[in-house]
Amino acid sequence: MSLPEPIDELIDRWQSAWSGRQPSAFHALCAPDVHYEDPLTVEPLEGADQIGAHAKRLWAMFPDARVERTGERLTDGQYLAAPCKVLGTHRGAIEDLPATGRFLVVQVLFYCELDPDRRRLWRVRAFFDAYNAAVQIGVLPGRGSLGERALLMLRGFGLRSRT
């Protein structure tokens, strides 16, 4: 089932805001009391300003970051699921980690609840594999590698069987 035009346009603009380098773009898309979470947020972000600041950190690390639609979006009119991917080259430092110059592709699912008027985003959760993203930029060892097994041993999990 395709999305109603206003909802489809809203999520198009949401994804464009993540690519657009304008933190203020989130204001027109979000309810005043919007809450946002993803694997990199310690606690939910509140308000479009906090989402814009979070996006600025992404743009600082990945100046060429862009968000692209990857599949059919689903909605019941109040809730919305939108699959996409984030692509970019790690050219900016992350905390004490210098830029690696590596290209990154991360599959993301935005799960959203619309405001009571069903015109703006009220609750948004982004789901993605942060471990895989760290592997792609060379921060963590790949899954199943000797390095990953060593990390698991250090954390007290022991060795895992390959079978």
Image (tube, rainbow, N blue to C red):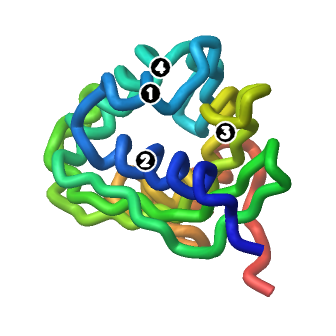
Instruction: Compute the Cα span from label 4 to label 1.
Output: 9 Å
Task: Look at mark 3 in the image and give the residue it sits on.
Answer: 125
Mark nearer the N terminus (3 vs 1): 1
Task: Look at mark 1 in the image and give the residue it sits on.
Answer: 28
- At 32% from the left and 38% from the top, the residue drawn is 58
Mark nearer the N terminus (4 vs 2): 2
Instruction: Compute the Cα span from label 3 to label 1.
Output: 18 Å
Name the amino acid type tagged 2: Arg
Give how far across and how far down residue 71 sits, in percent.
59, 75
Asked whether the residues under the numbered discs 3 and 4 touch, taking CB atoms below 8 Å apart as contact, a structural biologist would say no
Instruction: Compute the Cα span from label 3 to label 4.
Output: 14 Å
Q: Secondary structure at mark 3?
A: strand
Q: Nearer the viewer, mark 3 or mark 4?
A: 4
Asked whether the residues under the numbered discs 2 and 1 touch, taking CB atoms below 8 Å apart as contact, a structural biologist would say yes
Mark nearer the N terminus (4 vs 1): 1
Residue 128 visible here:
no
Q: Secondary structure at mark 1?
A: loop
Instruction: Compute the Cα span from label 3 to label 2.
Output: 16 Å
- At 76% from the left and 56% from the top, the residue drawn is 158
Q: Nearer the viewer, mark 3 or mark 1?
A: 1
Name the amino acid type tagged 4: Ala
Q: Quadrant of residue 125?
A: top right
Mark nearer the N terminus (3 vs 2): 2
Mark nearer the N terminus (3 vs 4): 4
Asked whether the residues under the numbered discs 3 and 2 touch, taking CB atoms below 8 Å apart as contact, a structural biologist would say no
Task: Look at mark 2 in the image and give the residue it sits on.
Answer: 13
Instruction: Compute the Cα span from label 2 to label 1.
Output: 9 Å
Q: Nearer the viewer, mark 4 or mark 1?
A: 1
Task: Look at mark 4 in the image and give the residue it sits on.
Answer: 48
Mark nearer the N terminus (2 vs 1): 2
**In this picture, residue 13 sits left or right of residue 92:** right
Give how far across and how far down residue 48 sits, in percent.
47, 19
